[in-house]
Amino acid sequence: MSTAETVAGNETADPPTPQGIPDEDISAFLFLEARLADEARYSEWESLWDDDALYWVPMHPDDDPATRLSYVYDNRRRIRSRIAQLNSGARHAQTPPSVMRRLLANLEVLERTADTVTVGANFVLFEHREDTTTWAGRYVYVIRRTADGQLRLARKTVHLVNAAHAVPTLAFLL
Amino acid sequence: MSTEQAATSRVRAAELVQPYRVHGSVYTSPDVFELELRRIFREGWVFVAHESEIPEPGDYITRRLAGEPVIVVRGKDRVVRVLANRCAHRGNRLCNAEAGNSSSFRCPYHGWTFSNDGSLVAVPMRDGYGERLHEVREGLGLVPTPRLDSYRGFVFASLAPAGISLLEHLGRATGAIDRLLALSPTGTLQLTAGWMKHHQQCNWKMVMENNVDGYHALFTHQSVYDAVRPAKVSHVPSKVEVYVRDLGNGHAEIDYLPEYTRLDEEFVWFGRLRREQAPEYVAAMEHAHGPERTHRAFVVGPPHTLIFPNLFLAEMNIMTVEPLGPGETIAYTTPALIPGAGGLNGRMLRRTEGAMGPAGFLIADDGEIGRRNQLGLAARQPEWIELSRGLEDDLTDETGVVNHDKSAETPQRGWWRHWAAVLDGRLGAGEGDA
């Protein structure tokens, strides 16, 4: 399984045996992250990220981002730019912001290291603008516990079920 | 007369396009859309693939061309073909993968097998065809597109057996492809990063036309320039020597060359990259082209050119569109990676993701504006869309119709003039498909 340091990799090659379910504070952190994204609370969402952040939406689960194009491949600096654009009030594709609610399910631990835990979860997201679009897929998160006990998001990968085919505009936070 | 022809014969494009305005129904009418599929996407030349997508014998990709599924395949003879993706027996879609390598395609329905040059090579239990077997085997191969041609790696097809040549169609637009390839040490590209597929709720022409609209950036993309980073050069027309040009045949461009030449600064078009950030690429370019031509290529940069009807050379990206309906389009985008460019290609991938596609800082907003354009046009008044900006300052020279104000609607006027001529069958149409 990948860690925050790994760039590429097949994240669908998850462990074949149960690794446990996330601790309560980890789950609560992920539910908060989902709610902030749903409610377009951009700066608060941004504050969850660690400095080595990677927010990645590939077109195929096995793609190597060194040679393959992704829908989103944001490091910390680009996350800052994305949030600045959303906060500008002139990001037309999110003006007004989509009304969204997402469900997280099947949360499971995929890997633990000394200071990180990797969590996989399935999601369904209802996005309403003038019509409702249903998005679905799998999130893989790497969450870090800092020395002072805070939780930080180091990596979030979004495997959309329809990523290989044409997708509508996704200017919101997936 | 077929139903389709009956519907489209009601359309007279000359009545919908005037020198400085077009009728709103060009974006919304199902009859116009049907006629476009026939006149532009079936009878005309359309971009279908790049040779680098299928470099080896047996490599194939599947695409749609005017709604028809096709296999673009390099045969064992290395020849590139575009074949109808339909089993010649009962019509099953034959190849169901997006890409791959295979010497043959076997239909899972009754086991008919076709070589990757299209010929029928195996019919199971063939005795059942009796005396017709020979005729079946000879006559029922995968149907190739009537015409196929390429220009420097860009493959174009036409579903009509006759019409103008690809070079006649491309006209002055070959210069834009040449300009892009001047940035490659090998004179080739590598479109191997995969295509972003963006489903947009607007007419395909809005996607294409907007690419050469020099007027919208200050408004549509204000959030990028205000909140993220300033534009590479100003989008205020009076502050830059950026020209717009109608190249003829519907091709058009925004030409940054005069401004870049004036600045005489390398890579203004690539985040003002410094040479030391791309040492392998710079060395390969100087080795291939010498220091002067290399400097010139780095200064003038890539084209920003629309090639009628479905190819946009988006500087270091390639974009193509697939029309699905009057208000529905898929836009495909991939970076124009350069063989031997080393780390530059990695930068290019990240730049494409930043700007383009459904989550891109630029194109997501263009898609939203396109959607609202389509929604707004549901109001039938005013009937006409105004495209007169800069009309009085258009200059005709050997490069086409040029306007020195980048916000002039010169590219749109050229696009629509050609569009109407093609739809009315006045030029560029095939003769055998009617």
Image: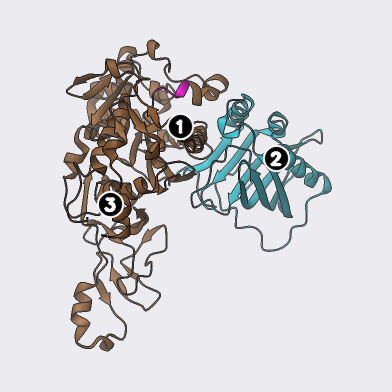
Q: Is residue B59 left or right of residue B424?
A: right
Which chain's residue wears label 2?
A: A
Disc 1 and disc 3: Cα gap in Å? 32 Å
Task: Name which residue type carries label 3.
Answer: Arg
Image spot of residue B161 (x, y percent):
18, 55
- Asked whether residue B340 appears in the rendered view, the answer is no
Q: SS at mark 3? A: helix
Q: Which tag is nearer the camera, tag 1 or tag 3?
A: 1
Q: Secondary structure at mark 2?
A: helix
Relative to residue B271, is residue B30 depicted above or below? below
Q: For mark 2, does the 10 Å Cα neighbourhood hold few (<14), some (14 to 19), or many (20 or more) residues? A: many
For the record, the magenta segment spans: B214-218
Please tell me which residue is depicted at 53% across the width and 24% down the height of the picture.
B224
Query: In the picture, which chain is cyan?
Result: A
Whether tag 1 and tag 2 are in contact, CB under 8 A, the answer is no
Position above or below: B432 against B266:
below
Judging depth in this view, the residue of B202 and A157 nearest the camera is B202
Q: In the image, which is nearer the foreground, mark 2 or mark 3?
A: 3
Residue under numbered circle 1: B381
Q: Identify the amino acid type marked 2.
A: Asp
Residue B268: name its quadrant. Answer: top left
Q: Residue B42 — which label?
A: 3
C-alpha span from label 1 to label 2: 38 Å
Residue B216 in the magenta stretch? The answer is: yes
- The chain assigned the colour brown in the figure is B
- The kind of secondary structure element at disc 1 is loop
Circle number at residue A38: 2
Q: In the image shown, does B282 or B169 lie closer to the viewer?
A: B169
Name the amino acid, label 1.
Gln
Q: Residue furthest top?
A: B239
**Residue B289: where, in percent of width, then height?**
23, 29
Residue B183, above or below B391:
below
